[in-house]
Image (cartoon, rainbow, N blue to C red):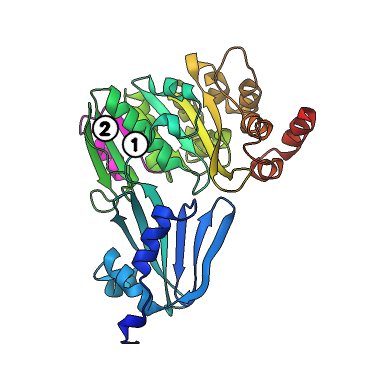
Amino acid sequence: MNNDTSQLRDLLKEIIDLVNTGPALTDIHIEQDAPMMVKTPRGWQSISAEAVMLEDMIPVLKAIDQDWEDKIIESAIDRPILLSECRLRCNVYRLASGAKVTISIRRLPLHPISLEKTGLPHYVKAMLEPTKGIILVTGPTGAGKTTTIAAMLDHLNASRSSHIITIEEPIEYQLERRQSIISQKEVPTDTASFSSGLREAMRQKPDILMVGEIRDFDTADTVLHAGESGHLVLATMHTNSALSAIAKLLGFFPGEQREQRAAALANSLVGVIFQSLLPSEDGEAFVLASEMIFNNNQQVAPFIADFSKAHLISEFMKRKADNMSRSLNETLAQLVAKKTISAKDAMRSTYNRLELHETLNSQR
């Protein structure tokens, strides 16, 4: 190792400058012996051609975990760093048969943003009016699901006298008590898993439950029981549409149970929000595009209870007169019409390219 510390880069200062005054970004990727990269609205870009050496990384690694060198032998390290303006979720891992160290950093606001600033339509607050049921927030990694959930919880925290319990991996937003009691649990520090944390939480007098991710049968089953038993449950999933979130949730159950659990979901589902982040037309900012299924007055319940009719939910979402549901293509077409995003980026984001192509052509 080079002992001439005067020649070392101040990598921590570079990171702080980037997140405070640099370009619009969500992530920073620091790989040993390679240039530092940032994820901007237009994708991954290098900050400079200069490679980052292990010596440069050590102060950052120690800021993440003083014992990083010992701990990284066993597994990746997941730790937050709190700055004055934001929170950095840091994941340290090894590459190339242990020969290289990499730091993956996700930039998050220090406090939840308001629902008005998420980019979701103003009427999304209607989804938070029920005192029981299930709300799913879904989309790809990096689509802002955590930010949306945090905004929802902050709204509930400010407007209800409730007990809110969250199960997260890791805790990304520290919620401060306002009208509600806040109990935030981290996997695996405070509870072994999402499913065990959720089961434990059911005995701790919650009114509102948040599950960081539904990823197995046990969690899916407990979420449905919680939604049925008078709790408001918010949970995230990774899917490519709102409808596929419903299909994925029911897919955790074996065939003989699926019909019964579909009926339970039909009765307890409040709504599904699918979201995706796109570059603005000028490439300088991120724009949220969303798709929503509102089960207002049990309007989509019959199509969930008999999932062979699930395709009819897509038709229901296109009606304008009697519901607040909307398709992703409807949102994308509106954003293109306003010149907020480009047609090219809209086409890349949609899961129904033919329909969107026809819609955009009709707008010309």
- Quadrant that contains the C terminus: top right
Q: Is residue 305 visible?
A: yes
Which quarter of the figure has residue 285? Answer: top right
- Can you say whether 259 is above or below 21 in the image? above
In which quadrant of the rendered image does the N terminus lie? Answer: bottom left
Residue type (three-letter) at the residue carrying disc 1:
Met
Instruction: State the residue at coordinates (39%, 62%).
Output: 15
> As drawn, is 164 to the left or to the right of 301?
left
Mark 2 secondary-structure assignment: strand
Is residue 332 toward the left or the right of residue 178 in the image? Answer: right
- Residue closest to the eye, 237 or 247: 237
Q: Is residue 3 above or below residue 311?
A: below
Q: Is residue 206 above or below residue 214?
A: above
**Left or right of 197: which side holds 345?**
right
Give residue 164's mark: 2
- x 35%, y 38%: residue: 112
Bounds of the magenta segment: 195-214
State whether residue 106 appears in this view.
no
User: Is disc 1 surrounded by few (<14), some (14 to 19) or many (20+) residues within 10 Å?
Assistant: many
Q: Position of residue 81 (x, y in %)?
A: 30, 57
Alpha carbons under labels 2 and 1: distance apart: 8 Å
Q: Quadrant of residue 78?
A: bottom left
Residue 225 colored magenta?
Answer: no
Residue appearing at x 58%, y 22% in the figure: 303
Residue drawn at point x = 42 percent, y = 45 percent: 216
Residues under numbered marks 2 and 1 in contact, where contact means CB atoms less than 8 Å apart: yes
Where's residue 27, x and y in %?
46, 56
Q: State which tag comes first along the sequence, 2 or 1.
A: 2
Residue underneath mark 1: 210
**Label 1: element kind:** strand
User: Is 62 left, or right, of 315 in this rendering?
Assistant: left
